[in-house]
Image (cartoon, rainbow, N blue to C red):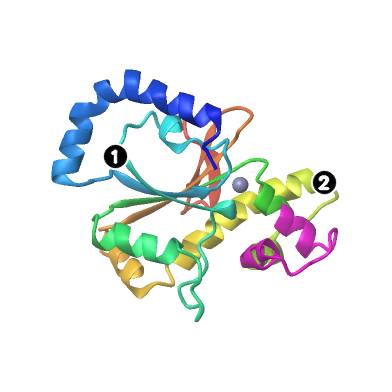
Amino acid sequence: MSLPEFLINGYKDWKENIYPKKKELLDILFKEGQKPKAMIITCCDSRVNITKIFNGEIGDFFVYRNIANLIPSFNLKDLNDGVHPAIEYGIENLKIKDLIILGHSNCGGIKHAYQLLSGQIKNNNKKIDRWVENIKPSFIKLEKNQNNEKNIKSLEKLSIINSISNLLTSVEINKLVTDRKLKIHGIWFDLKTGNLEYYNQSQNKFKNLT
Ligand SMILES: [Zn+2]
């Protein structure tokens, strides 16, 4: 077994041309440990390049990815997803002050949930079928119309709001938010326009960030 050529070539290029420029920063991060500026929970989707969207640098973000950037409730008995320990580590060990849930347009995971929950496709009890069950509370709240595309877009946003609510099912997180030691942010990324929409919690609306 060997690595595909594009990975080997990409690595060689990075080691030769990028690494020397980053060596100093990596040295500091090695000696002092990571001190990420924020935690971002986003989708596995390859089109969502977190570090580039925020013009970030190595060490800036503590990132967790799963299908459709979902945070299940902390009250579930069976916490099988790694998102909960990642959040716990981020908050307790890395002292994260800003936790961002970043969803996106054309999300395959949300589309799958929509089609499944609206009966357009069959539930085959695959792992992804079970995983997107977490979207059900958002799907129930969705004001559905005839336009599937619009419904899916609304579901992408509702699901971010639901994950924020689920975060607050953790007693520890709830207290940190109340004490203003932790801020939770919801963002929706439009792949086509490159726009970020920020969730305004008091108005319960997503609005263009700039
Ligand atoms: Zn996605």
Q: Position of residue 209 (x, y in %)?
A: 47, 34
Please tell me which residue is depicted at 38% across the width and 60% down the height of the picture.
86
Please check the rendered image and state whether residue 120 is part of the magenta-colored stretch, yes or no.
yes
Q: Quadrant of the N terminus?
A: top right
Q: Is residue 160 left or right of residue 15?
A: right
**Amino acid marked by disc 1:** Gly
The structure residue drawn at horizontal position 50% and vertical position 48%, both measured from the top left corner, is 42
Q: Is residue 123 visible?
A: yes
- For the magenta stretch, what is the residue range? 112-134
Q: Position of residue 205 (x, y in %)?
A: 55, 48
Q: Is 160 included in the stretch rendered in magenta?
A: no
Q: Can the viewer see residue 143?
A: no
Mark 1 → mark 2, Cα distance in angstroms? 41 Å
Instruction: Describe the element under mark 2 as helix, strand or loop.
Output: loop
Report the magenta stretch's main SS. helix
Write down the residue under mark 2.
147
Please give the residue where the numbered disc 1 appears in the rendered image: 59
Q: Residue furthest top?
A: 17
Decide: is 193 above or below 159. Answer: above
